[in-house]
Amino acid sequence: MSTLQDLLAAVASGGIEVVDLTAPLSEDTPILQLPPPFANTQRFSRSELSRYDERGPAWYWNDFTTGEHVGTHFDAPVHWVTGRDGEDVSQVPPRRLIGPAVVLDFATEAAADPDFLLEVDHIRSWETTHGALPDGGWLLYRTGWDARSHDSDQFLNANETGPHTPGMSGECARWLAEASPLLGIGVETVGTDAGAAHSFDPPFPCHSFLLGADKYGLTQLQNLALLPPTGAVVIAAPLPIVRGSGSPARVLALVER
């Protein structure tokens, strides 16, 4: 059998499990909230065109409106000013949409402190147990935040001082952008940066450093708890929007059982 036939046989038999890392997309999907005077994205909405009726007797379909960065989505380099000369989402090479993934689990720490930040030392400690970060792969950062995605207030977790969600320190974001072999990071929160990252130097360092280094971001992932620390393969499938800064995406993981 060929390699692809082996893969299909393993998926069919359950030897390889396909885990959906994508949050369902609906009118209730939480969206990023920026303070004035900044513009905010539209949340997902739809209007019905026909549903087996006089408008179309044999078919059901809708128009929908949403932003490029709503729900589980892909950040392309051009999304940030540091990557303004980089790829838009339609220009991302297809081979870079598939890669090995590692999962760093800090859900316990994030439960105790919603402002928890991943540091370089956390990653180095993880590497002593699990090995080096994968070349051309994804770092998936589990915080348990997907459990909040059913409730926008809990998910955004904002008060008078701003949002409080876990993320990465500026030093960690710079290190992942400049020194790691990764092609991107994936998180469970509304964006790749911590809720308090507007106050970091530079602000929003994951966006600034990673996108500026022609790396990518995946956000609002789910089911990372179902993945092993190493060994999974991620398939990230954004729409190839011409001049798009990003796109809602279906993100799947292949896991050998």
Image (spheres, rainbow, N blue to C red):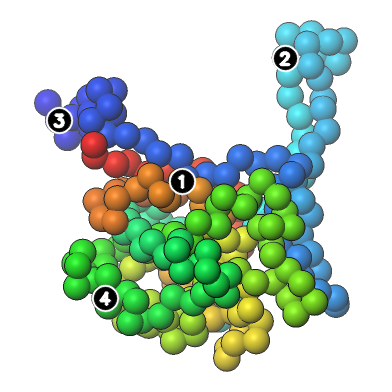
Which numbered disc covers residue 59? 2
Residues packed near mark 4 inside 10 Å, few (<14), some (14 to 19) or many (20 plus): few
Q: Name the residue under label 3.
A: 2
Which numbered disc covers residue 223? 1
Q: Earlier in the sequence, mark 3 or mark 4?
A: 3
Q: Name the residue under label 4.
A: 125
Tag 4, which secondary structure? helix
Residue 131 x/y as whole percent: 19, 67
Cα distance between the residues tagged 3 and 4? 38 Å
Cα distance between the residues tagged 4 and 2? 55 Å
Q: Is label 4 or label 2 in front?
A: 4
Query: Given contact means CB atoms under 8 Å apart, are the residues at marks 3 and 4 in contact?
Result: no
Q: Nearer the viewer, residue 224 or 32?
A: 224
Cα distance between the residues tagged 4 and 1? 24 Å
Q: Which residue is drawn at 45% across and 63% down?
A: 108
Query: Given contact means CB atoms under 8 Å apart, are the residues at marks 1 and 2 in contact?
Result: no
Q: Is label 3 or label 4 in front?
A: 4
Query: Which amino acid lies under the numbered mark 2 shown in the image of this protein?
Result: Trp
